[in-house]
Amino acid sequence: MNWRIIGQVVGILMVATGLSMLFPLAWSHWYEDGGEKAFLLSMAFCCLGGGVLYGMLRGPMGEGLSQKDGMSIVAAGWVAVSFCGSLPFFFSGFVPGFTDAFFESVSGFTTTGASILEDIEALPQGLLFWRSQIQWIGGMGIILFSIAILPFLGVGGMQLYKAEVPSPVPDKLKPRIQETARILWKVYLLFSLMMFVLLLCGGMDVFDSLCHTFTTMPTGGFSTKNLSIAHYESLYIESVIMFFMVLAGINFALHFRLLRGDGLCFWRDGECRFFLLALGGLVLFVSLGLWGRVYETLGESLRYGSFQVISIVTTTGFATADYTFWTPAAQLVIFFGMFTGACAGSTSGGIKLIRFMVCARYCHKELFSLVHPRGVREVKLGGRVVPEGVIHGILGFMALYLGIFALGALVLTTLGSDVVTAVTATASALGNVGPGFGAVGPAENYAGISVSGKWVLAWLMLLGRLEIYTLIIFLLPEFWRQ
């Protein structure tokens, strides 16, 4: 592996993370909340540490990046920025210790939204803004962002793009990865601006509108209020957030095509069509199940049922109701939603619907072969045959995902969590969702998880965000052999 390139890029990411603290520092100064010292210390550490690392390893980049280099940069980069992101929490004194600070930072950058904070509104505005900002940055990916604004690296970026967004069906919009990154970020910025304006129109102040925009578009779920979106008791605000959660759950390449005038691109794309139809069906199923049992009117059932279903399926994690008091059928839908996620190429977590679609069609093919042993049937997606290698990769991914889920739940129960909490916290962390059931339900937080349990969940969040392979590959001895 080219350790020089890996170290240089990680150093640049540390400096970039430190410089990005200028924005929350400005909010701290504006509100005079006393948080300036924490951000200045954090900026100094990140910029000096990253600068020294870059300076020590500065030199010719060589011929470019190998697949190993790309995976190493992504893994090391995410760990490094998560560490840097934890420093303002730690130095501020509002977070009990480094474990909690690192957990909060990882949860932010991976857009999970699981929090250890018991009184969010007690935090200074600068720190609240930092929580939101790291989710917004993490939404489209630290590495993707870096290759969009750091083209001077002079190395090929496709390896980074593949490691950061390992979609089963890659969708490059432009031949150069830097151009693709810029296009995706322009769409991301446009939607963020639209949402910010709409929230302002709904009565939110500038600070809350900006923070909730920063945590909705990346499907993150951090809020500036203890009661999350329920604090506002506004159907308009809930509707705006639901709309943009759905948008954030759709492949951003499709948004680009829509903005270019392809009005039917959502419907023509099989995964997006399945996502919208399945989401509508689940909303209807849950809402009808709540009507007369939990809520008296159909309007209330639709309002709260649709918000929670959309929030969980898109892995955002905002809350307007405590679904732990819902019917068992509704709770089961919420639990399964922690696994599915939305579309590939979106900012959501989870397994992604495209993988379920391929698995379902592969199962149908196998059943067809039993009925017609001599028949030939291919697995197709979007009118194109899915290669056997891709199918095997998807099946392997899903088996690995479920295996890690089972192991994570077992470890958490061993560390003292009850079964419901352990199972749902693991599913939530691995799927980058946020809330779970039991002690980590939507009205609770992760403060009660043991120190060891928080480290386990932090690594599960990173595994889920990087879609398993990019991190777990380092456990294979073969990876380290020439």
Image: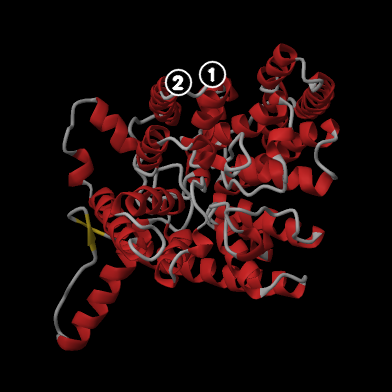
Instruction: Give the residue type that dot 2 points to.
Output: Leu
Furthest toward the front, the residue is 296
Q: Is residue 358 left or right of residue 138?
A: left
Identify the residue at horizontal 36%, vertical 50% (top origin).
300
User: How crowded is the residue under tag 1: few (<14 C-alpha within 10 Å), some, or many (20+)?
Assistant: few
| Res. 198 visible in picture | yes
Q: Which residue is mark 2?
A: 200
Give above or below for 434 relative to 478: above
Give above or below for 252 relative to 371: above
> Gap between marks 2 and 1, in whole Å?
7 Å
Furthest toward the top, the residue is 30
The location of residue 468, given as percent across then percent down, is 56, 58
Camera-side residue: 125 or 53? 125
Image color mode: secondary structure
Q: Which residue is mark 1?
A: 206
User: How crowded is the residue under tag 2: few (<14 C-alpha within 10 Å), some, or many (20+)?
Assistant: some
Q: Is residue 249 left or right of residue 89?
A: left
Q: Is residue 473 left or right of residue 34?
A: left
Judging from the image, what secondary structure is the residue with disc 2 in? helix
The location of residue 11, given as percent across then percent down, is 73, 30
Judging from the image, what secondary structure is the residue with disc 1 in? helix
The location of residue 124, given as percent across then percent down, is 74, 27
Sequence-wise, the earlier of marks 2 and 1 is 2
In the rendered structure, find residue 101 and report the number of the disc placed on it: none
Res. 429 image quadrant: bottom right
Tag 2 near tag 1, CB within 8 Å: yes
Instruction: Give the residue type that dot 1 points to.
Output: Val
